[in-house]
Each structure stands twice: as structure tokens, then as C-alpha cells.
Amino acid sequence: MLCLCLYVPVHNSDQVEVEYFESNGLPSELKSLKSLSVFLPSQEFSTYRKWRMKTMKTEEKEHDGQLDFEEFVHYLQDHEKDLKLVFKSLDRKIAGQVNANDIVNSLRDLGVHISLQQAERVLQSMDKNGTMTIDCNEWKKYPTLQPAENIPEIILYWKHSTIFDVGENMMVPDEFTSEEHMTGMWWRHLVAGGGAGAVSRTCTAPLDRLKVLMQVHGSHGNNMCIMSGLTQMIKEGGMRSLWRGNGINVIKIAPETALKFMAYEQIKRLMGSSRETLGITERFVAGSLAGVIAQSTIYPMEVLKTRLALRKTGQYKGISDCAKQILKGEGMTAFYKGYVPNMLGIIPYAGIDLAIYETLKNTWLQRYGTESADPGVFVLLACGTVSSTCGQLASYPLALVRTRMQAQAAVEGASQVSMTGLFKQIMKTEGPTGLYRGLTPNFLKVIPAVSISYVVYERIKTTLGVQSR
């Protein structure tokens, strides 16, 4: 009986022998073979198995290490196409060659910063003729470990603002790949994020209302703590009162998310960027401007949320009744009280959240990204929690002043004070700590909010037919 052995040589790589192909798709000339062995690099065989699971889209049982010949040919073709796409994304000048500067610039757009010397070392390992440039053939022949099939895969694995909802929608919007735009997956991600935010905000609503009460009513004379605040709310209006203001808080998710996404995409076009992903500075500018546009449009809902959270039993019949009473008693300008500190708060929140998240992401990718670009659940949750917490901490004094300005007419005996007047008043009567009243319940809700929004996001995403990360 005839036997045939195929050997795939790869430099510095352990080989794994795959005993035989399945006969499906095997050329007729090879049907009579008693055995057909293939020696593949262990890394390559592992990549093939991941590719097979993704393309089959079903969790089929492994066939005892067998390879399907026809599938394996498709895998090689797909792999070749992916390599060409990555090379094309690096070769921005369409010169047919990639140099060290191309590698530095492409990675910088993803928020990964390497020096020119590091990029040159990468080129030296690929360059065969000493020109310090590589063409597509040299790129394809290089035995790269390549954790991501193409550069945009980092975007897929490191979504942030779409997944995590901590009650304040001031984060810079996530990027979406060209494939996600073309296939319509982007809107499924946004819907999943909106649904996750609704569940997350509802679950943490008691802590959010407690934060508002402590921001408005907390002082040296009324040193409200978590337990006394919760007891006071339940005593005044029962268990249901813990969720006052949550309805409008959930309703505003949809218009705010949609407006922010559309504004972000339009601003990217106005900035003249044709790249799939922006650099960090460009993202910050575009995201902040998109946040200002979205917040300006839905800001009256923010005022309604604060007033409903502070209301006493029987004061308002519902959202529409609250809006009517404010409009009748205070006029249209009441719906934009606290607008200035709210807009100013976007800058430190978005900037610090983005900077810390990107720093944590880059640190992880540099240390562990050689094996996979997927950080896993716990790393993603940790990075999201830390960056969101730091962003909130930086913008909290502005958020407190905004809330007090929104509530001025609702608090008996409160005078109408400007933003700077409130800052001076708080510093004089309460000191710097007065600017952070309500911070404890705000921080207590971050971890459960992030965890709940992630779990619900994954469930809704699966229901909508979005492939798992």
C-alpha cells in the first residue's frame, strides 16, 4: 500500500503530526492511499482548529484530530487573503512595500505605541534582501505568530463604551470595523448595549437615587450615610420609591446612544479620516464633540431624571406631569439648568476614561498579546471598571454642581446660584470634601453595573445573531 507524508516547514516551530485526512474532498488520485500524514506547526494546527470552529458556526465534536482536506484548502485560502488584507492596511502609500514608519503609524492608530527601533527590529526579522522594506511575498512567508487575523480584530475584542454602562454615558464611542458596518452588525451591538444598559441601570437604581439625594441634601448638618439614606427613602415612599427616576433614566439610553453614534461618524468624516480607526487624540476630540451634541439634545431628560429622583410621594403623577409642572412653573430655561457644568464634565470624564483604558489595553497587549488579542472576560471587566471609576472621579465635582443646579427649584428655600457661585458656596461651607458627597454609593454601583451590563450584553448579542467575541 502506498503512503504519503506531507511536511510543512516553519522556522523555530514544534511540529504536530496529524494522522490522516478525512476522505471528504480528497483528490481522486489519493483515494487509494492507506495513510496520509501531515506535519504541521503546532501553532498553525491550533489556528486551523479555531478557524474551523468559527467557519462551521456550530460546536461540532472534534473528529479525533482528523483534518478535512477540502476545509483545510479553504483555510489556507482564507489565511492567504487575511495576510494580504493586513499587508494592504500597512501599505498606506500603495507602494507595494512596507517600511518601519508604516508599522509604527498603523499600530499608533490602534493606540499601540512602539518606537522606530522596535519596528526596524521587526522588519529585520522579515527582510531577506537587506533593504529594510518588505513586499507582500516576504510578508506572507514570514512565520508570524499573529494572534489577530488582521489588525481590526483588536477593535472587535476591546469594545468598551458599547458594553459597559455605569449610568453616565460620557465615554468616547467605540470603533466598528468595515466588516461590521457592511454586515449591519454595528446596530446589533448598539441594541445589545442599550438593552444591557437598561437592565444594569434598573438593578443599580437604588444606589443611583441615593447618590442624587446625598449630592443635593447632604451637608455638615445632614450627614447622610448609605444605610440612613436607604432607610429614609423606604420610610417615605416604600420599596418602590428606591426606583424613582429610573424610568426616564432608561428611556434616554436609546436616543442618546443613537445621536452619539451618528454624530461621531459624521465628525469622523468631517475630520477627513478615511481610516478604519482613529488615533487616540482624534477619537477623544470626535467623541467629546459627539457627546456634547447628544447631551445637548437629551439634556431636558437629565433634568427630569433628577427632579423625579428627588420627588416626594404624590408630587408628580409621572414623567409627563413632571415636565408640565416644570414648564408651567419655571419656564423652558429650567430644562437646561446645570447645562454648562454637564458639558464641561464630558472633557475630563471622556479624556481620562479613554487614556486609562488605552494604557491598560496596550500594557496587556504588549505582555500577553503574542498569544491572543482576546483579553478574556475578567481583564476586560477590570480595565472597564478602573477606567470608568477614574473618569467619574475626575468629573465628579462638576456632576455634583450640575445636580444641585438641576434641583434648585425643587429644594425648599434654595436660592438660584450660578455654577461658580455654587463652587464657592460648597468650598466655604463644606470644604473640598463637599464636592464629593454621594461618591460612595456612586462607586459601589460601578462593579455591579459593569458586570451586569457585560453579561446582559453578551446574551442579547447572541440572541441577535452576533458572533461571539
Image (cartoon, rainbow, N blue to C red):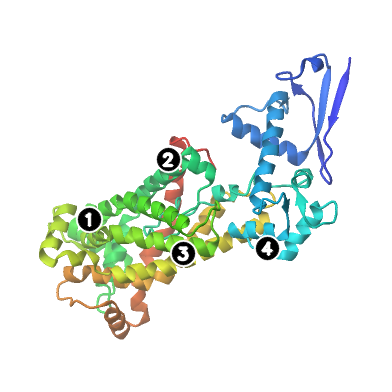
Query: Amino acid type of disc 2?
Result: Ile
* Residue under numbered circle 3: 285
Q: Considering only vertical position in the picture, is 422 above or below 352?
A: below
Query: Amino acid type of disc 3?
Result: Val
Q: Residue at x 77, y 51 (%)?
A: 134
Tell me which numbered mark, 3 or 1, is placed earlier along the sequence: 1
* Residue under numbered circle 4: 114
Mark nearer the viewer, 3 or 4: 3
* Residue under numbered circle 2: 460
How far apart are the alpha carbons under marks 3 and 1? 39 Å
3 and 1 marks in contact (CB < 8 Å): no
Q: Whole-percent x and y of residue 144?
A: 75, 47
- Of all residues, the one furthest to the right in this rendering is 1
Mark nearer the viewer, 2 or 3: 3
Res. 202 visible in picture: no
3 and 4 marks in contact (CB < 8 Å): no
Dot 1: element:
helix
Tell me which numbered mark, 3 or 4, is placed earlier along the sequence: 4
- Label 4 packing within 10 angstroms: few (<14), some (14-19), many (20+): some
